[in-house]
């Protein structure tokens, strides 16, 4: 049984990619699901693959389903019915994967290796290598980022801390003339601070 290893690049940044292994007898629907999991995307949107050449020109479409609101030059193949091995025409076969037709998340999928034997320790299909930080599907990623922003706002010492009498010290422990000293200096000069 042939094991296909694909490198899935995020189109906007070649340094962000995932290596995915899949059996040649599994379907494009399996590859679609594995790509979404590897990039931490949900599966709520439309998706399609295109056969491609070395210049990344889009060819025959392999779609999640036939979409009524989309025009096709030829009826698309359906992911669940199309086996991976049936579409490998070249040892460096390429596909373009588009997810969420509103945001147009685009990934370049390139066959980088074919193995004759399965690795018994792996589950197929699966992601075996992750490089770079996945782009956030819906803007800021998860609660960690929103909590981090709240902490940054809560403990922002740039302006409020200076008014509360905090001062910055230089390497010798001497105040640099901020905070309370500036406030006192402004009062002596008759200025309101």
Image: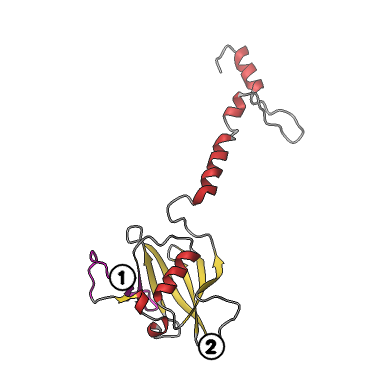
Vertical placement of residue 2 versus 59, above or below: below
- Residue at image coords 23%, 72%: 72
The quadrant of the picture occupied by the C terminus is: top right
Question: In the image, is residue 149 part of the stretch drawn in magenta?
Answer: no
- Quarter of the image holding residue 185? top right
- Residue at image coords 48%, 61%: 40
Residue 13, numbered circle: none
- Residue at image coords 66%, 25%: 177
Q: Earlier in the sequence, mark 1 or mark 2?
A: 1
Question: Residues in magenta?
Answer: 48-73
Disc 2 marks which residue?
116
Q: Position of residue 147 (x, y in %)?
A: 54, 43
Disc 1 marks which residue?
65
Q: As drawn, is 121 to the left or to the right of 172?
A: left
Q: As drawn, is 12 to the left or to the right of 131?
A: left
* Residue situated in front as seen by the camera: 149 or 142: 142
Question: In the image, is residue 68 part of the stretch drawn in magenta?
Answer: yes
Vertical placement of residue 119 versus 182, above or below: below
Q: Secondary structure at mark 2?
A: loop
Residue at mark 1 to residue at mark 2: CA–CA distance: 31 Å
Q: Position of residue 120 (x, y in %)?
A: 59, 81
Q: Would you say residue 14 is visible in this rendering?
A: no
- Residue at image coords 32%, 58%: 102
- Quarter of the image holding residue 86? bottom left
Vertical placement of residue 39 versus 128, above or below: above
- Quarter of the image holding residue 186? top right
Q: Position of residue 51 (x, y in %)?
A: 35, 77
Vertical placement of residue 20 versus 99, above or below: below
Q: Secondary structure at mark 1?
A: loop
């Amino acid at each position: 049984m042939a094991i296909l290893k694909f490198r899935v690049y995020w189109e906007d940044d070649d340094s962000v990619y995932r290596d995915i292994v899949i059996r040649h007898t599994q379907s494009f629907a399996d590859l679609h699901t594995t790509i979404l999991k590897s990039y931490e995307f949900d599966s709520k949107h439309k998706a399609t693959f295109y056969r491609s050449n070395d210049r990344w020109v889009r060819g025959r479409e392999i779609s999640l389903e036939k979409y009524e609101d989309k025009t096709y030059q030829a009826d698309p193949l359906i992911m669940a019915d199309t086996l991976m091995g049936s579409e490998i025409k070249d040892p460096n076969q390429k596909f373009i994967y588009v997810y969420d037709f509103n945001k147009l998340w685009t990934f370049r999928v390139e066959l980088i290796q074919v193995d004759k034997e399965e690795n018994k320790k792996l589950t197929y299909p699966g992601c075996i290598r992750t490089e770079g930080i996945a782009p956030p599907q819906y803007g800021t990623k998860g609660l960690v980022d929103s909590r981090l922003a709240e902490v940054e706002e809560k403990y922002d010492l740039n302006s409020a801390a200076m008014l509360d009498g905090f001062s910055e010290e230089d390497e010798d422990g001497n105040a640099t003339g901020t905070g309370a000293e500036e406030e006192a200096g402004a009062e002596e000069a008759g200025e309101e601070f």
